[in-house]
Amino acid sequence: MKRKHGIAMTAVGMAAVLGLSACGSEGKGSDDKKPTKAADSAPAKDTAAGNGVEKLSGKEINDKAKTELRNAGSLRFKMTSSKNGEQMKIDLALDRQGNCAGTVATPTTGSAEVIKLGDKVWLKADEKLWASKGNPQAAELFKGRYVSGPTSDPSLSGMTKGCNLAAMQAQMGQDDGGTETITKGAVTTVDGQQAIPISAKGTTISVATTGKPYPLKIEDTKDGNVTTLTDWDKPVTAKAPPADQTIDITKLKQSQKQGL
């Protein structure tokens, strides 16, 4: 499996919140000016103007977008992915301090709300998710309530790995490797914002041509993953749930050990 660019790899790393993986490939290389059309995006009516990235090479555009992602204080990460033939959706707002809030869901295994503040996490899963884990007792016990505890608890840590934006950004400092050419397409729009698509080996990254050159959308045609990045540098507004809606997993485990 060849390595992706840092931007695509960060998206994959965030998706690890549910154990997702992607195995497309991108790499560094010279710019190929042959136009590449971004999937699901319409041509822009006007010539792109603003930050000027549309005039750069594919590699230079990638580097600028990568810098913005590396320096972001916070963002909202939305990903739709297929795993074992089932569509999975992730929607998380996260920041460099490790705070995050959002949801993860699949049609057959259920959904969960995740809140992480510092080193504490709250998880509210629906009955379908608990049942899919083979734990009907938990489904009844935690119905309509959050399970809370430290991020170090192995029962909760797996659901919070994708909340660590700083860790993902640190990975982008590593060399991407690869020699694939990055092609540059024609200016398009992504959710009403002008963008320039750059592509390599089945992965297309649409980069904003106005304002800061943020990577707005990442599409992996091989795996069918679609990621959008929004709410750049906006604070994560999550709050701790009310105590009467929460079960402390640490206390619960202590009670179980004591036979209570």
Image (tube, helix red, strand yellow):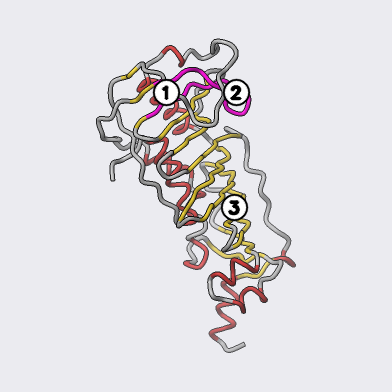
On the image, the x and y values in percent for residue 138 come to 61, 75
On the image, the x and y values in percent for residue 143 come to 69, 70
Q: Residues within 10 Å of mark 2 (few under 14, many from 20)?
A: some
From mark 3 to mark 1, how far is it between C-alphas? 41 Å
From mark 2 to mark 3, how far is it between C-alphas? 32 Å
Q: Nearer the viewer, mark 2 or mark 3?
A: 2
> Which residues lie in the magenta part?
184-199
- Residue topped by disc 3: 117
Report the quarter where the C terminus lies.
bottom right
- Type of residue at label 1? Thr
Q: Residues within 10 Å of mark 1 (few under 14, many from 20)?
A: some
Q: Earlier in the sequence, mark 3 or mark 1?
A: 1
What secondary structure characterizes most of the magenta part? Answer: strand
What residue do we see at 62% from left, 70% from top? 248
What element does badge 3 sit on?
strand
What element does badge 2 sit on?
strand
Q: Is residue 197 magenta?
A: yes
**Image quadrant where residue 185 sits:** top left
Q: Nearer the viewer, mark 1 or mark 2?
A: 1
Q: Residue furthest bottom?
A: 259
- Type of residue at label 2? Gln
- Residue topped by disc 1: 36
- Residue topped by disc 2: 193
On the image, the x and y values in percent for residue 103 come to 61, 52
From mark 1 to mark 2, how far is it between C-alphas? 18 Å
**Image quadrant where residue 233 sits:** top right
What residue do we see at 53% from left, 71% from top? 133
